[in-house]
Image (tube, coloured by chain):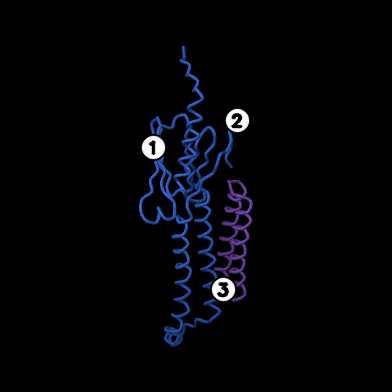
């Protein structure tokens, strides 16, 4: 759960485009189907040979292992989906929060205060990103780590427009000077 | 006997993963509707698969 600071308001939350998840879904479907196909057709082809060698594969065995395999692949798919869903960018009136989930218990969280943003760049390259409206957003900041890249973001033009509008409001408010230590 | 051990291992795996998912679904920024939908699909598919495994023993 994102803890907001005092006076901070959540403007919007951006997630990655579903395309990022689509390739995983296709891969998982194939992964779930292949062993079931091998078990079903493999039994038809190898069945007589296995029976001759004293190994019997019954329909119940096929059903048992197929169900077990599908359950395993499904759980792996839900892990991937959870990781995808938790990759978010939160834009508030004070900062941008980029949260990237890698596995269930590993994530990367970057906070960019709005007054430190120097430049926002979007990158939409290729046919699919153009047609499906997704791309990368690069945020240049003043500091040690100068650039933050957010990949596969849904509708990057609209996100950039929101950030630009917010930056305009931040520039209108003067940043308090840093007091020097005596 | 081997199939019973496999079923037990799969069930333990399901319980552990469910606990991990529940942790995220309850604590992270999941929309209420999304949480209900993913929970429903996750448990229905898993229980169905485990049920098929148990009945085909």
Rounded to the nearest whole Å, what is the CA distance between mark 1 and mark 2? 27 Å
Number of marks in the image?
A: 3
Q: Quadrant of the N terminus of chain A?
A: top right
Q: Is residue A123 above or below residue A23?
A: above
* Res A7 label: 2
Rounded to the nearest whole Å, what is the CA distance between mark 1 and mark 3? 57 Å
Residue that mark 3 sits on: B1
Rounded to the nearest whole Å, what is the CA distance between mark 3 and mark 2? 62 Å
Q: Is residue A13 above or below residue A171?
A: below
**Tint applied to chain B in the drawing:** purple
Q: Are labels 1 and 2 assigned to the same chain?
A: yes
Taking the image as shown, residue B15 lies to the left or right of residue A66, namely right
Residue that mark 1 sits on: A147
Q: Residue at the location (48% across, 44% down)?
A: A158
Q: Are marks 1 and 3 in contact (CB under 8 Å)?
A: no
Q: Is residue A86 above or below residue A72?
A: above
Tell me the chain of label 2.
A
């Amino acid at each position: 759960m994102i803890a907001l600071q005092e006076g901070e308001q959540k403007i919007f939350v951006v997630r990655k485009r579903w395309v990022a998840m689509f390739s995983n879904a296709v891969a998982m479907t194939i992964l779930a189907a292949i062993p079931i196909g091998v078990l079903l057709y493999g039994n038809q082809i190898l069945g007589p040979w296995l029976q001759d060698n004293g190994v019997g594969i019954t329909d119940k065995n096929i059903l048992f292992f197929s169900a077990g395999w599908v359950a395993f692949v499904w759980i792996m798919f839900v892990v991937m989906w959870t990781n995808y869903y938790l990759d978010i960018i939160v834009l508030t009136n004070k900062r941008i929060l980029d949260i990237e989930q890698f596995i269930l218990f590993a994530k990367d969280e970057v906070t960019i205060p709005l007054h430190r943003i120097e430049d926002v760049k979007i990158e939409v390259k290729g046919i699919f990103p153009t047609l499906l409206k997704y791309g990368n957003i690069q945020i240049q900041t003043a500091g040690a780590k100068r650039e933050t890249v957010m990949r596969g973001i849904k509708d990057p033009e609209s996100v950039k427009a929101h950030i630009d509008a917010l930056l305009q409001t931040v520039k209108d408010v003067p940043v308090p000077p840093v007091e020097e230590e005596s | 006997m081997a199939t019973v051990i496999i079923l037990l291992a799969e069930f333990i795996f399901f319980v552990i993963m469910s606990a991990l998912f529940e942790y995220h679904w309850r604590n992270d920024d999941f929309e209420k509707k999304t949480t209900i939908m993913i929970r429903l699909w996750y448990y229905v598919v898993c229980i169905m698969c485990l049920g098929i495994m148990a009945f085909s023993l």
